Amino acid sequence: MLSSGQIAELRAAVGADGLLTERAQLQTYECDGLTNFRVLPGAVVLPRSTEEVQAVVRICARHKIPFVSRGAGTGLSGGALPAAGGVVISLARMSRILQVDLANGYVVVEPGVINTQVTERVRAEGYFYAPDPSSQSVCTIGGNVAENSGGAHCLKYGFTVTHVLALEVVLPSGELVHFGSPTLDGPGYDLAGVFVGSEGTLGIATKVTLRIVRRPEMVQTLLAAFDSITAAGQTVSDIIAAGMLPSAMEIMDRLAIQAAEAAVHAHYPQCGGLLLVELDGPCTETEALMREVQALCRGNGAWEVRVAQSEQERAVVWKGRKAAFAAVGRISPNYIVQDGVVPRTALPHLLSEIDTLAAAAGLRVANVFHAGDGNLHPLVLYDRTVPGQEEAALDLSYRILHLCIENGGSITGEHGVGKEKQQALGAMFAEPDLATMQLVRCAFDPDGIANPDKVFPRPRLCAEKTGPYVPHPLETAGVAEFF
Amino acid sequence: MAMAASETLAQCLARVASIVGEEHASAAGEAICVAPANKEQIAEVLRLADVGGLCVAPVGSGSKWGWGNPVRPAIRLGLGRMQALREHAWADMTCTVEAGCSWAAMQNELQRHGQMVALDALWPERATVGGVVATNDSGALRLRYGGLRDLIIGMTLVLADGTIARTGGKVVKNVAGYDLQKLMTGSFGTLGVIAEVNFRLHPVEKDRLSCTVAAPEPAAFAAPLQKLLRWDLSLSSVQVRTGKEQCALDIALAGRPECLAEHQQRVKDLLGEAAVTEADEAVWQARQRLFESTLVLKVSVLPAEVCAVSSDLQQWSAANGMEVASVAQATGLMTVALQSAVDRGAELVEFLRRRVAACGGSAVVLRLPDALRSPTDIWGADPDSLPLMREIKRRFDPHRILNPGRFVGDI
Ligand SMILES: Cc1cc2nc3c(=O)[nH]c(=O)nc-3n(C[C@H](O)[C@H](O)[C@H](O)COP(=O)(O)OP(=O)(O)OC[C@H]3O[C@@H](n4cnc5c(N)ncnc54)[C@H](O)[C@@H]3O)c2cc1C
């Protein structure tokens, strides 16, 4: 718990209107998008400037008070879950776009800026900010940086890290540092690259320089209906094998289609596997490629192939896909969103294994995935009121993660490790791998006060010694040499 | 660095030989050359060096040996025996390759399935994967495909204490754990030895054409270049080559054939039908050719400043009676070579640093004559994150055995 003296220091740092300590106020911040984990913080501060962030962090550093930064709280892995009795630093009030440099293709923003606001700001000039998480109308750039968020269009354009040129960061000591620059390859380690995706454990980003991209000449979106996920998946492989790099390739299964239809009436065909392909680029090229994609769809047995004829039709197609998570609420009282990755070619195998596991558990799983890069989002459906079902659903969802590891993939493609997957990280990486990551953590945050007890399998002190190299069990078993 | 007092060269050599085999360890002057066969052997050699306080320099083919501050290693750790392309998952468009594999050998293998690591490195026949990654090299393809930080999806590294660690993975999309491959890329062998690298791949550019347009000075290209980059063309690479009293803008297009002709026409309409000529692919070797000079810099400027900086440089060298050539990518990365009066290199370095400071850029000396070494600040940078970088180095390599002093701020 924070002492009254510490509370007074925080008040002096951010002003009375920047500090929340009432229980009812604090409850708003007790969880993020992963609502089954809840912890009440000791205080919430809402700084307005880098200086105020620094002042708060210095107080935390002096008293070794744990702090957790928070953007919009839409994270799905418990990243913004408060530390018990610690300080939550909300960046929501730091929401200005500070600079737009079109000639050099970048913008400088504060961390509380909402993802879509960046594109809105440069749209008229023909530019956009490419990373597009489904939550983009609410999540913040600070959160995106911390999670290295992705979206449907990252297949072609890359993830958040591809678009972060520079960062201003308040270190856990309160010091202010600058990583990267709008010019490439400045001398020194690529600390901006390391910071992106570090889930709030290395400090607080207070300014972000983002690369913006010019709008493509043409965008075309296609929907193709297949009898099975396998046929849809094969089409994705064929498209890639033909040397194309669509901006997005998404697959939904029957259950996910039903849910999306019920929620937003996207006019999706009812089928076993729905494939959505978006191509963008110069007109002649896009049109030529779209013809090839259509032929590949038909070749794999697509019985309906539609190309959206207007911007409005495109928007409807995407609305169904982007609403898919929430839409599942229409067909099931409760559900768990999982996020795993496998090499794309392992998708059909993995999906049939998921089916087997689901059948054995007596549960339904809806599948929505970014097929182009093997990132799947199985939605495990259950009913909390049925005794034992929640436990079974959680168990199934973790088993799916382990399947991903066994198939040479990853436990998270975009939602992060956070609180939820700490143990799973220990299954994916061996002890020496984790110990090496910990060296970075300790260099940035020797006292371990920035988002403590997240990401790593168990809290660890910076002075702790680890043992020598031990081969990972999977490696010994010959299952995977490196994953 | 000298051998530890307690150990003679012969003793050390014997111990190293017992790890890698006698035929793979030899004495070369004051140093020992050792060629481990795998990451486990790298780990054993490093452990031995760490305990003995012996300075180690990882070496690929040595093509960029002079880059960074000089190091006098007790052990030259050669990666020459680790050349395998371990895996090419062509359907997933990824590969895993050992650090000692030459860039060209890797590309030739990948080419069999029409794929490549989309980066044109210097001296591909000689340069090894490990060396390219450790120095963060990149060429003209960067405009379209990004740099190594966008192409590397995982890595196996060996730390100074012999820890073998993996980071990232074999899938293109992955946010589990810290992205240590970013930390290693461009770290000049100061944090660990890169043993294996996992890349994401792209299809090779089957249909590609290059064209060029000449002008007396690069400033003339500023406006058309801005326009060109705003259009949605199938651009692969764009560079501005500048020499004494002449310069050229080179453009490579790659894409579907039906599109290429149309885009080439748009380029011609922009730059003047008569002025644009077809260019030989060899123009893309221009950057590499600059390294025939003894003083070469990597300069980074804002993309929109490329032509202005190239012009200023041209004028400055004319006014100062020096022959300077440069190749600038549209990304803002330039290679600058001094081709006469090399003894006056310091003036050039100073001019460039002053010129790029205004836009937050940088100028790093890659190659310079020995006579200029000690008075020249190779890196020319003092970022406010330097104390943090030093702390990272201290955590990774507490006894400073890996390339000590080679990097920025004597890291
Ligand atoms: C319906 C829905 C759909 C989603 N779809 C996607 C998707 O398609 N792709 C995807 O990648 N994610 C998706 N997400 C997850 C989530 O939106 C992203 O992880 C997002 O980046 C979180 O942003 P936020 O502002 O809400 O961050 P928060 O949840 O507030 O915080 C996330 C993490 O960032 C840290 N953090 C926040 N600000 C800073 C800062 N300034 N400096 C340092 N650390 C900071 C926090 O400590 C925490 O660890 C989805 C979530 C929902 C609810």
Image: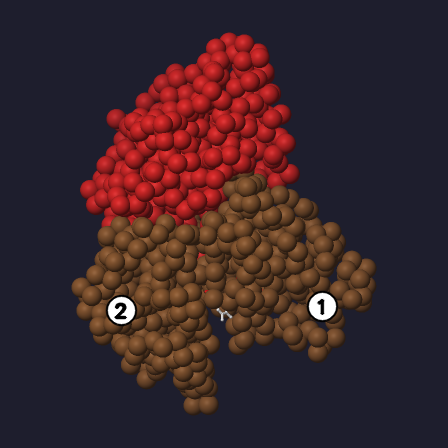
Chain colours: A brown, B red
- Label 1 resides on the chain identified as A
Q: Quadrant of residue A27?
A: bottom right
Residue B137 image point, x, y percent:
42, 33
Residue A262: which quarter of the image?
Answer: bottom left
Indicate which quadrant contains ligand 1.
bottom right
User: A313 or A256, which lies in front?
Assistant: A313
Q: In which quarter of the image is the N terminus of chain A?
A: bottom right
Residue A306, percent from left and from top: 30, 69
Contact flag, marks 1 and 2 (Cβ < 8 Å):
no
Please tell me which residue is depicted at 29% across the width and 27% down the height of the picture.
B280
Q: Which residue is drawn at 47% across and 44% down?
A: B230
Q: Name the residue under label 1.
A: A43
State whether residue B264 is above or below residue B339.
below
In the rendered picture of this protein, how many numbered marks are placed on residues? 2
Q: Neighbour class for label 1 at 10 Å: few (<14), some, many (≥20)? A: many
Corner quadrant of residue A90: bottom right
Secondary element at tag 1: strand
Residue in view at x 48 percent, y 10 percent = B340
Image quarter (top left, top right, bottom left or bottom right) of the C terminus of chain A? bottom left
